[in-house]
C-alpha cells in the first residue's frame, strides 16, 4: 500500500513537472543568451545618452565594486552565497515580518529567483510559473554558479529613470562608470532594486536618502561596513547629486547611426561598444544656433524648420540636427527629407562644364531662353549678356546656368552629380540645372565635401570603431566606397567658384572671417533655402523651410541659412579643443587596430562574425576577414 502510494506520488509529480516545465527555455538560460546591446559613444569616448530607455555595456563581475556587491547582498539576499537558489529561512523570516507589519513589507525571493523573473519567465502568479521558478533556480545554481548569477542580475535589473543595469544607472544618475561609484552611491543604487520608481532620486530625493540609510544599516548588520563608515556615508549623501545627463548628443544622429551600429554589432549576445564620430561640443553649437535663429527670425519669415549637417572632408559626421525640436518631431530633415536644392545644384553643372574642357574665363550667354515653351528667369529679372563662367556662378545666374547645361549636355550634368555622390532620382529636363530634382541635405553636403577633399564620392559615415564585450581587440570600421574619382584637375577651379560666392556675391552673409567657400540655393517660391560650403576643417550644409512645403516670406539661401552657417562656423572654429573635428581619431589617423569592413565581409561570408571580424572557411579555424 505504501509502495503504491509512493509510486502514485512519483507519477503525479512527474506529470506535474512535465506539464510545468515543457516550455522552459533551457537552451537560452544555459547559454546565458542576452539581447544584443549596442552602446553608442561620442568621438571622445563619452556615452552618447539617447532619449528613452538606456542600457549600458555588460559589466563583468570583477568590474563591480565590492561596496556595490555588499550593498546589494545585504539588502536583497543576505544568504545568497549560502543557499541553493531558494532560501527557506528567508521565506520564513519574510512571512514573519509581514505578519508583524500587517502587510507585505519583505519578500522571500532570492536573487536567483529575481533573475529568473527578470529574464526568463513572465510575472503571472500561477502554480505553473511557481514550479518553473523553483526548478530553474535549483538548476541555475548548479549550472552557472554564484558569481555569474549575480553578474547577470546586476546587468539586467531595472533601476528607474529608463536605466536597465547598474552601468546604465551609474551613468544616468551620477554620470560615472560603475567602477567609480563610492559607498553612498552604491548604497543608493542597491536600494533602488526593490522599488525603482518609488525611490528614484531624481524625483524623490528624500525617499532615496531614507532608503539609502536603510541599505547602509543593513550593511552594518551584515558586517560589511562599520557604524562609523555608515555614519560617514549618510553624511556624505548631501553631496550626492543625481541628475540625468542632458541628451546633448543629438537624437537625430543617434537614430541615423543606430542601424549602422546594429550591423556592426551583429547578432552576438552581450554588449558592443560603438564609438561614433559625433563631437558633443559641435552638436551643442549646432542645436543652439538653429534654436536661437528660429526663435529670433522664424515666425516673421514663416520658417518653421531647419536642419544642419557638419562633417569632416572625409565624411565623418560630427554634428547633425534634423529639425527644430526632436521631442516634437523625430523626423530627420537632414537625412530623410527630399527637397529641391535650387542653385546649390549648379555645382554639378559647372563641374560638368570643366570636365568638358571649358575654363572659368570662357563665356556663356545670360539672356532670355525659350526651351519648348519653358523660360528660366534670373532673380530680379535682369540679364547680363555674355559673362564668364566664374561670374555666372558667383551671381547664380539662372539663364546662363541653363544655357551652360544645354551646351555640355544634361546627361553629362547628371553624370557629374552621380560622380560627386548624388544618387537621388534626377529628371533629365532643362530645369534640372536650377535644382528642381529633389535631394537630401546629407548627400548634398557630402558632394561638397568631395570638392574640399579632392576625391569623389565622399560617403557620410558615423562610426569610428567598435569593441565587443567578450573580445580584447577593437576594430576600426572600414569605409566601403567605389573607386575614388580624382578631382585634382578641377578642384582648384571649383573651390575658386565657391570662394567667390562667399567673398563677393550671394553668399556674403555666410562669411565667417576665415577661408570659406560655398553656394546658396533657393527653390521656387522660396519653399526651400540652402547654404552648403566648407572651411579648412569642416563641411557644413544648412536647409530651412516648412514641412508642409508652404512658401517662406522672401527667404533665400543668402539670408537665414547663410547666417546659421556663419554663426555655427564662427563658434565651431573658435578654440576647437581636443575633442573636435581636428581629432586624429575621427580622421582615422590614430593608432587604433586593424580595419574591419563589416559591410563587405558580411556580404562575402555567411559565417562572418562582426565581434571579432572573422569567418569560418570550409576547413580549419576561423580567419580574419581582410576585405
Image (tube, rainbow, N blue to C red):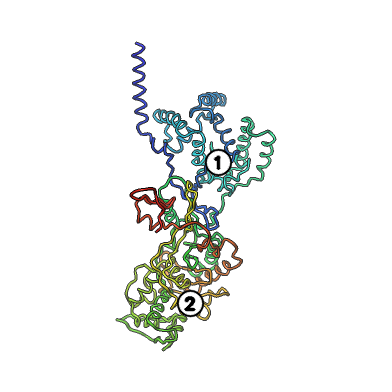
Task: Report the quarter where the C terminus lies.
Answer: bottom left
Q: Quadrant of residue 457?
A: bottom left
Q: Is residue 334 above or below residue 387?
A: above
In the picture of the structure, the residue carrying the numbered disc 2 is: 495
Tell me the SS state at disc 1: helix
Q: Quadrant of residue 139?
A: top left
Residues at marks 1 and 2, CA–CA distance in whole angstroms: 55 Å
Circle 1 crowding by C-alpha within 10 Å: few under 14, some 14–19, many from 20: few
Q: Nearer the viewer, residue 407 or 128?
A: 407
**Residue 52 pos. (x, y %):** 49, 50
In the picture of the structure, the residue carrying the numbered disc 1 is: 62
**Residue 323 pos. (x, y %):** 47, 62
Q: Which mark is residue 163?
A: none
Tell me if residue 425 can be seen.
Answer: yes
**Left or right relative to 421: residue 538:** right
**Residue 109 pos. (x, y %):** 50, 30
Amino acid at each position: 500500500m505504501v509502495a503504491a502510494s509512493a509510486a502514485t506520488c512519483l507519477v503525479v509529480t512527474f506529470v506535474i513537472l512535465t506539464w510545468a516545465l515543457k516550455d522552459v527555455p533551457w537552451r537560452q538560460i544555459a547559454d546565458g543568451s542576452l539581447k544584443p546591446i549596442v552602446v553608442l559613444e561620442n568621438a571622445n569616448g563619452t556615452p552618447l545618452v539617447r532619449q528613452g530607455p538606456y542600457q549600458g555595456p555588460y559589466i563583468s563581475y570583477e568590474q563591480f565594486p565590492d561596496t556595490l556587491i555588499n550593498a546589494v547582498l545585504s539588502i536583497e539576499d543576505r544568504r545568497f552565497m549560502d543557499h541553493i537558489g531558494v532560501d527557506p529561512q528567508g521565506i520564513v523570516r519574510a512571512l514573519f515580518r509581514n505578519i508583524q507589519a500587517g502587510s507585505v513589507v519583505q519578500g522571500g525571493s532570492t536573487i536567483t529567483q529575481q533573475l529568473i523573473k527578470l529574464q526568463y519567465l513572465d510575472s503571472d502568479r500561477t502554480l505553473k510559473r511557481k514550479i518553473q521558478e523553483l526548478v530553474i533556480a535549483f538548476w541555475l545554481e548548479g549550472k552557472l554558479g554564484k558569481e555569474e548569477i549575480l553578474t547577470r542580475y546586476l546587468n539586467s535589473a531595472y533601476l528607474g529613470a529608463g536605466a536597465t543595469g547598474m552601468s546604465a544607472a551609474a551613468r544616468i544618475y551620477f554620470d560615472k562608470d560603475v567602477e567609480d561609484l563610492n559607498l553612498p552611491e552604491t548604497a543608493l543604487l542597491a536600494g533602488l532594486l526593490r522599488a525603482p520608481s518609488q525611490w528614484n532620486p531624481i524625483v524623490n530625493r528624500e525617499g532615496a536618502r531614507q532608503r539609502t540609510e536603510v541599505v547602509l544599516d543593513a550593511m552594518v548588520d551584515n558586517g560589511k561596513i562599520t557604524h562609523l563608515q555608515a555614519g560617514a556615508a549618510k553624511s556624505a549623501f548631501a553631496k550626492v547629486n543625481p541628475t540625468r545627463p542632458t541628451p546633448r548628443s543629438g537624437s537625430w544622429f543617434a537614430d541615423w547611426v543606430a542601424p549602422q551600429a546594429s550591423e556592426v554589432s551583429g547578432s552576438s549576445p552581450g554588449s558592443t561598444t560603438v564609438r561614433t564620430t559625433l563631437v558633443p561640443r559641435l552638436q551643442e553649437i549646432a542645436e543652439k544656433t538653429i534654436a536661437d535663429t528660429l526663435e529670433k527670425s522664424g515666425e516673421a519669415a514663416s520658417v518653421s524648420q531647419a536642419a544642419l549637417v557638419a562633417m569632416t572632408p572625409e565624411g565623418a559626421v560630427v554634428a547633425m540636427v534634423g529639425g527644430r525640436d526632436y521631442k516634437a518631431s523625430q523626423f530627420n530633415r537632414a537625412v530623410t527629407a527630399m527637397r529641391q536644392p535650387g542653385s546649390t545644384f549648379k555645382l554639378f553643372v559647372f563641374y560638368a562644364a570643366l570636365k568638358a574642357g571649358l575654363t572659368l574665363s570662357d563665356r556663356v550667354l545670360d539672356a532670355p531662353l525659350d526651351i519648348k515653351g519653358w523660360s528660366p528667369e534670373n532673380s530680379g529679372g535682369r540679364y547680363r549678356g555674355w559673362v564668364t563662367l566664374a561670374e555666372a556662378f558667383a551671381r547664380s545666374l539662372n539663364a546662363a546656368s541653363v544655357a551652360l547645361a544645354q551646351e555640355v549636355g544634361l546627361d553629362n550634368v547628371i553624370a557629374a552629380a552621380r560622380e560627386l555622390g548624388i544618387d537621388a532620382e534626377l529628371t533629365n529636363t532643362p530645369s534640372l540645372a536650377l535644382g528642381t530634382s529633389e535631394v537630401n541635405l546629407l548627400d548634398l553636403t557630402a558632394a561638397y565635401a568631395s570638392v574640399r577633399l579632392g576625391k569623389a564620392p565622399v560617403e557620410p559615415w558615423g562610426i569610428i570603431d567598435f569593441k565587443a564585450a567578450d573580445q580584447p581587440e577593437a576594430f576600426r570600421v572600414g569605409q566601403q566606397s567605389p573607386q575614388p574619382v580624382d578631382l585634382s584637375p578641377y578642384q582648384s577651379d571649383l573651390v575658386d567658384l565657391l570662394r567667390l560666392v562667399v567673398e563677393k556675391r550671394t553668399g556674403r552673409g555666410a562669411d565667417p572671417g576665415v577661408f570659406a567657400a560655398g553656394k546658396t540655393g533657393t527653390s521656387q517660391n522660396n519653399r526651400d533655402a540652402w547654404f552648403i560650403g566648407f572651411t579648412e576643417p569642416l563641411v557644413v550644409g544648412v536647409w530651412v523651410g516648412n514641412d508642409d512645403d508652404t512658401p517662406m516670406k522672401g527667404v533665400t539661401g543668402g539670408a537665414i541659412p547663410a547666417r546659421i552657417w556663419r554663426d555655427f562656423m564662427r563658434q565651431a572654429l573658435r578654440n576647437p579643443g581636443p575633442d573636435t573635428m581636428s581629432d586624429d581619431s575621427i580622421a582615422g589617423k590614430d593608432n587604433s587596430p586593424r580595419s574591419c569592413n563589416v559591410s563587405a565581409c558580411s556580404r562575402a561570408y555567411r559565417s562572418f562574425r562582426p565581434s571579432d571580424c572573422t569567418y569560418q572557411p570550409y576547413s580549419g579555424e576561423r580567419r580574419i576577414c581582410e576585405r
